[in-house]
Image: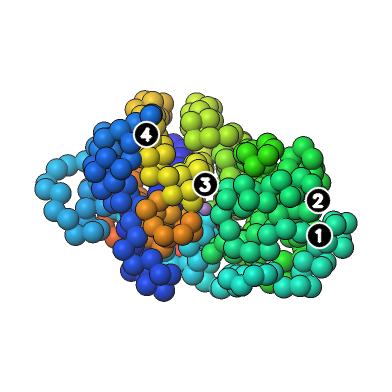
Amino acid sequence: MRAILIVLDSFGLGAARDAEAFGDVGADTFGHIIEAAAAGRADSPERSGPLKLPNLQKLGLFAAHDDYIGKDGGTVSFDALYGVAQEKSKGKDTPSGHWEMAGVPVLFDWGYFPKTIPTFPKDLTDALIEQGELPGILGNCHASGTEIIERLGDEHMKTGNPIVYTSADSVFQIAAHEETFGLDRLYALCDIARDLVDPLGIGRVIARPFIGENGEFTRTANRKDLAVPPPEPTLLDKMTEAGRQVISIGKIGDIFAHQGTGEVVKAAGNMALMDATMNAVARAENGSLIFTNLVDFDQSFGHRRNIAGYAQALEEFDARLPELRSALKEGDLVILSADHGCDPTWPGTDHTREVVPIIAFGANIQGQSIGERESFADIGQSIAQHLGLPSLAYGKSFLN
Ligand SMILES: O=P(O)(O)O[C@H]1O[C@H](CO)[C@@H](O)[C@H]1O
Ligand SMILES: [Mn+2]
Ligand SMILES: [Mn+2]
């Protein structure tokens, strides 16, 4: 009996009840992709037409969305527990979403940088320049990571000044050329930055290495997130304390600041991350947790407002589900969810405050709706129950 938790990063199922506070009333990552695809606005050389997710459909994903947005999908039965969850945490960012699903909602306010130019306080950038022995910095604004390297990449290569930017999330991001600036040097600079932004309550410092030249740049898979540790022990810490195996796939290690994350497996791209998940399913011991983050949905399609790419990524994920299902052992529980929204049809390039799906199957589960949950923490509580761990401080189990 194991638990397998797969996070489709940014796959929201509709504006949260508190979306107004985030300017996100009407956002709906899934709903807007369905609509765009049906209208032929998600066509690309690789895919076309309406969104086809036959396996997720059988697991109640569309029904969970219909129920939440108040659409009558008819009476059909499904093979999974399905529903949505509201977020208790104050931010619509990746660590908040993941920590909450692991039983620790973020009830304090993160620090954020203002939408002014320059966005960073002068003493912060001065200290970074001095301690990092830099000629200067570029950027110093809110930006989309791909747009800013396209705009400033050449100047960065000429001057050696790293590109420093933020977003609506609590992040301090540093982009630099992997070859001319150097990856190790970028990581070392991020370590310096981590200490400098700690007093400002910033959730993450992110290294954003890229390659290329003459205005044509590509980010590499060597992104590295330096997150502050969760404020309280999460499900992962409790697993580790109890001597249970944890296998963290993709960004999970970084998101939890390597607290209780056990064996960390990295891979580039959703399909390679699913391969790593399948490999873990084949070997994980009884009582273990496999925790996977599929980052492409967010990083490559949500933030990039690429509807066709998002639709294709969903279809590719859907196609891996039969394989996952047939690899399960007796008593294994699989939960599919997300950490926030990132509606590819929404203005700007930031996340959107949305409910997330909860789809749970395996472990002799009889399909039924679990409705609208009050917190992502219901996921962690259900996993704790399933694996026979003591209850967590937050969350209500949706298992019998
Ligand atoms: O635009 P890019 O660099 O992808 O950055 C995005 O990714 C960050 C972390 O997930 C978010 O804060 C957002 O800024
Ligand atoms: Mn995320
Ligand atoms: Mn993101």
Establish if 85 lies above or below 224: below
| Callout 2 amino acid | Thr
Of the two numbered discs 3 and 2 in the rendering, the one whose residue sits closer to the viewer = 2
- The answer to which of marks 4 and 1 sits earlier in the sequence is 4
Of the two numbered discs 2 and 1 in the rendering, the one whose residue sits closer to the viewer = 2
The residue that disc 3 covers is 299
Q: Is residue 180 left or right of residue 225?
A: right
**Label 4, ligand 1: CB separation under 8 Å:** no
The residue that disc 1 covers is 136
User: What's the CA distance linking mark 3 and mark 2?
Assistant: 28 Å
The secondary structure type at the circle numbered 4 is: loop
Residue that appears at 75% across and 53% down: 162
Establish if 44 lies above or below 35: above
Q: Could you say which quadrant of the image residue 182 lies in?
A: top right
Q: Label 1 neighbourhood size at 10 Å, few (<14), some (14-19), many (20+)?
A: some
Q: Is residue 390 left or right of residue 232?
A: left
